[in-house]
Image (cartoon, grey):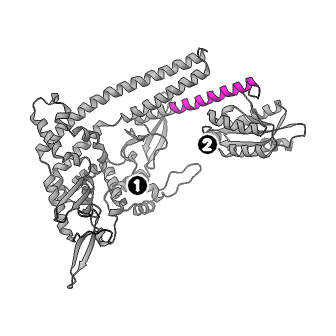
Amino acid sequence: MTTTTTAAADPAASLIDPPISTAVAISYLRVSTREQASKGGTDEGFSIPAQRDAVRRKADQVGAAIVEEFVDAGASAKSADRPDLMRMIQYVKTNKVAYCIVHKVDRLARNRADDVTIHLALQQAGVMLVSATENIDETPSGMLLHGIMSTIAEFYSRNLATEVTKGMTQKAISGGTLGKAPIGYLNVRTRDDQGREVRTVELDPERAPLIEWAFKAYASGNWTVSQLHDELTSRGLVSLPTPKRPSKPLAVSSVHRLLTNPYYKGDVVYRGTRYKGTHPALVPPEVWYQVQSVLTAHKTAAEATQVHDHYLKGTIHCGQCGSRLIVSNAKNRHGNVYCYFVCSGRHSKRTNCTRGAILIEDVEKLIEDYYTRVQISPAQRDALSGMLHHEFDRLMAAETDELDRLTTHRDRLEHEQDRLMQAHYADAIPLPVLKREQDRILGELDHLNRRIDAHHGDYADARAHLDDALGLLANCADIYQQCDDANRRLCNQAFFTKVYIDEDDELRVENNRPFEMLLDPEVNANALNWTQNGDKARIPANDSVGKGSSLVRGVELRVSRVRTSLTVLALTATP
C-alpha cells in the first residue's frame, strides 16, 4: 500500500529496472509554454501528466518498461535545441534502448528537417520511435504515416505563426498593447455587459506618478540616467511583483530603457512600425522628444562633459584638417584666463594643421550670426509649406491606391488558402501539392504583410513634423538668442551635423535633415515659383517641386531633434 502511494506521488517512482524479458523504453514529454507547465497551480500543469499516462499505457501494450523519462516544459518544437531532447539523444547513444515513446509525433519536432535528424539519431542507436496516439512504426505504412503527420505538424506550426502575426499586427493597428505593459501601467481584465472578458491597460496609481516625474526631470537636462536612477530608488520605485519574482528596485539600464520607450507618449511599436495606442499617454509627446534629445546629447562621446565643457564642443570642426575644435584655457602673466577653441589635430600633433586658436566668444558670435542669416521670412515659410503640403497630397493619393492594391491581393491569397484547405479535406488534392501551394501562399502573404506594414506610416505626423521644422526655421535666430547653453546645444544638434570654421573665420555648415533641404536655394526658388503660378495643381511635380518630393519622403528622419527645438521654443519664449 505504501509503495502505491509513493508511486502516485512521485512520477519517477514508476521508472523501474525492467525484468530481463521486458523491452527497455524511454519516454519524451513536452509542452510549448511555461504557462502550460504550471496550470492549476501544480509543478507540471495538466498536459505533462496526461502525456505520461498515455505513454505508460502504450509501453504496457508493446511489453516495455520505461526506465528513463525526458521532459521539456515550456520548450517550442520549432527548434531542436531543447535541453532534455539533447540529453535523450546522448542517452540512447550510450544505453541499450528498444523504444522511444512519445504522446504524438509533434512532441518531437514541428518541422521536417528536425524530425528527420531526430528520427535518424534514434535509428542509428537502434531505437524504434512509437507514438501513443498514432499508428507510427517501422513498417512502410507506419513510415508513410509518420511523414504525413510530420508534414501536417510543420504546416500547423507555420500556419499558426502566420495567424498569430496577423492577429498581432491587427491588434497593433487598432492601438492595442502587445504583451505586458511597461512599468507605470497595469494589465487589467474586466467583463463587459455580456460577460465577455476585456483586456485593457490602465495607469498604475503607485508607479505612474514616479515615471511621469522621471521624464519631466530628465527633460530639464539637469540629471544623468544614473542620478535619476538613484532618485527613483530613493522615492520607492520598484518593479511589479510576479509569482516567481518579488518587487525590486530598477536597474540603471531599465531606467534608460523606459526613457526611450515611445509607449509612454501613447504609441505602440510592432515589427518596427509605430501605431497610435489606445492606452492613456503618461507624458506629452514634446516632453518625450525632449528626453530623447537629452539622451543623445549625453551619449555623444564628443560632447560628453569633461574638464573644459562647452555647448559647441563636438559641433565645430577645423576648416583646414577637419579635426574637432577643443577648449583650451590660457592664462596670462597677470592671471587672466582666456578661453579658446584650438584644433585637436594640431594640439595632439596628429595632423600638419596650422590653424591658429580662436576665442570662444568669437565662435559663439559666428554661430549667432549664421542663425540670423538663415532665418526665413513668413512669406518664405508660407511658400515652402504650400508647395510641400501639395506634394504630400500627391504622395498620399499614390500611397492610398497602392495600399488598396496590396490589401486586395492579400485578401485574394487568404481566400485561395482557405479554398486549398477545403479541397484537401475533400481529397481533391494530394498532400505534397497542398504543402507546395501552402508554402507559396505563405511566402507571398509574408511579403505582402511586410509591404502593408510599411505603408502604414502616419502622414499626418509627417506633416506636423514638417510644419514644426518650418516654424523653427522661421524663428531660429530669436530662439537661439533666448536659449541657455544646454538648449543651445540641442538647437545646434537639430540644425547641424558639422560646422567648419575656415582660417578666415568663415563658416561652412553641414545641415541635418530636413534643414539641408529647406535651406537649399533651389527648393526655395521652386517654392516661390510654385506660389506665383496661379494654376498650381496642373504644374508637373518635377518642374515646380524639384527636391521637395525627396524632402517629404525624408521628413521624419530627424523628428526627435525638430521636436526638441520646438520644446526649446516653448521653454524659452518670453511673453
The answer to whether residue 344 is visible is: no
Q: Quadrant of residue 123?
A: top right
**In the image, is residue 125 part of the stretch drawn in magenta?**
no
CB atoms at circles 1 and 2 under 8 Å apart? Answer: no
Residue marked by disc 2 = 34
Residue 350 visible, this angle: yes
Q: Position of residue 53 (x, y in %)?
A: 75, 34
Q: Is residue 245 left or right of residue 480?
A: right
Chain part drawn in magenta: 134-162
Q: Which residue lies furthest to the front in this view?
A: 352
Residue 112, compared with residue 208, is above or below; it is above
- Mark 1 belongs to which amino acid? Leu
Mark 1 closeness class: few <14, some 14–19, many ≥20 residues within 10 Å = some
Quadrant location of the C terminus in the rendered image: bottom left
Is 238 left or right of 7, judged from the image as shown? left
**Residue pointed to by mark 1:** 210
Query: Going by the picture, which residue comes out furthest to the right?
Result: 20
Q: Which kind of residue does numbered mark 2 sit on?
A: Arg
Q: Is the magenta stretch mostly helix, strand or loop?
A: helix
Residue 21: x and y in percent read 90, 37
Q: Residues within 10 Å of mark 2 (few under 14, many from 20)?
A: some
